[in-house]
Each structure stands twice: as C-alpha cells, then as structure tokens.
Image (cartoon, rainbow, N blue to C red):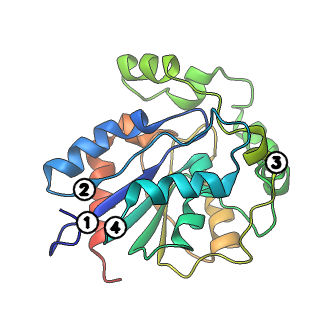
Amino acid sequence: MAGLEGLLTFVPIHAGGDGAWSWHLVADELRQRGHDVVAIDLPADDESAGLSDYADAVIGAVGDRSDLVVVAHSFGGFTAPLVCARVPVRRLVMVTAMIPAPGEPPSDWWANTGHADARRTLGRDDQSDLETYYHDVPPEFAAEAMRRARNHPSDRAYREPWPLEAWPDVPTRFLVCTADRLFPAEWMRALVRARLGITPDEIESGHCPMLSRPGELADRLEAYGGEPA
C-alpha cells in the first residue's frame, strides 16, 4: 500500500530490551486505517552488531517502500536518525526517545544528559521495571512485555560513538510522555529544546504509550505523517 495517495509506511524502531512485538497494537491500528507498517526485531542477539548494523536491518526490511514515517521509541532514538540519513523519509517521530549528540556513545548519554539527577528528583530512581516502564500498561500486556525482554542493545552498539556529524535533514516531531517514570517529562522537555531546538508535543502516558494508549498514539502518528513534508 505504500506510495498510494494518502497512505503511509510507518517504521517503528523499538526500545532497548524490546522487540517488534511492543508495537503490535499500534501496528494493528494503523493497518486497519490502510497504512503499511514495517516493524522488526533489531539484531541485538549479535554482539558484533553496531548501530549501523541496526540501521542496515531496518533499511533492508523497508525495501523499496516509500512515504516513510520512521518512529523511534526510547533507545530507538540512536538508530532512527541513521535510517533517516540514508533513505528518503517523510517524517521522523521520536516517542520519549533518547536524542544522541554527534560522536556520543549511548553509554555516555545518561551522564551527559543528567538523567540520574532527573530521576532522583522525581523520586523514581529505585523502582522495579514493572513500576518504571509498565505502571499504566494493562497487566496482561505488561506481563507479556517482561516475558519477552531481550538482551538489547549489544555491547558494541551501546559503547560505540553515534556516527552522524549532525541531525539528519528530515522534519522531526517529538512526543513527551507526561507520566514517564524513566524519562521525566520536565527534564525531557528541556532536553528536546536543547538538542533538537523544537518544542515537543505531549501524550498522557508512561514510558510505553504503544501498550498503554495504542489508539491515541496511532492517531498522533497518522496526523504527523499527514503533515506537509
């Protein structure tokens, strides 16, 4: 369906520890509206795979599809811009995603952005994974997400410098999750302004709106994709 008038190809890139399954509810919503969705498991089981290999895997899955809307969740923010730098993309949407700086390894991102202080200020720095990531996700989906947890990213992808010299020349939108216990909203708003120079939009959700508010997130993505390129 990609390339037909009014229809889009959404390319969601999952978070660290996640896989394509985390996007299945949003993918169903978008497909019901006639759009195409390409969601894959990044090759995190391959310890030799780096960030460019992650981008290769996404680009290979996309193939010759067009009208792409690339969507990054959390750690997916380190891969999505690499895809956008190599193939024509209509829009990049960052969903409570990590925003890399040129040459910055993901392992350094946390200290460079003051993340620990932000969580400590929120009083959320000692919570369990369930409380941190899935506090507003329906219990059956939270349990399944935790059962499916993967060893991701690879050590190489986590420690190698982000290879781009600048943010790719693609229209970018950012969606802050106002109830996010991993990436506190006030801290993330400031980081978006500092690193991307834009004002983010917001959704009333925890860290995983694709599982807690899939219909609303699909609405947002479809609207972003429909904006003039």
Query: Which secondary structure lies at badge 1?
Result: loop
Query: Marks 4/2: CA distance?
Result: 13 Å
Residues at marks 2 and 1 touching, judged by CB atoms closer than 8 Å: yes
**Viewer can see residue 98:** no
Residue 74's spot in the image, x, y percent? 58, 47
Residue 194's spot in the image, x, y percent? 70, 71
**Viewer can see residue 65:** yes
Q: Quadrant of residue 163?
A: bottom right
Q: Which residue is mark 2?
A: 36
Rate crowding at label 3 as few (under 14), some (14 to 19) or many (20 or more) other CA atoms within 10 Å: some
Q: Quadrant of residue 81?
A: bottom right
Q: Which residue is mark 3?
A: 159
Query: Marks 3/2: CA distance?
Result: 33 Å
Disc with the residue nearer the chain's start (3 vs 4): 4
Query: Marks 2/1: CA distance?
Result: 6 Å
Which amino acid is tagged 1?
Leu
Q: Residue at x 36, y 68 (%)?
A: 68
Q: Tell me the tag on residue 122.
A: none
Rate crowding at label 2 as few (under 14), some (14 to 19) or many (20 or more) other CA atoms within 10 Å: many
Q: Is residue 113 left or right of residue 8?
A: right
Task: Work out which quarter of the rendered image holds the N terminus and state it.
Answer: bottom left
Q: Residue at x 60, y 29 (%)?
A: 132
Query: Which secondary structure lies at badge 4?
Result: loop
Q: Quadrant of residue 64?
A: bottom left
Which amino acid is tagged 2?
Asp
Q: Is residue 53 left or right of residue 206?
A: right
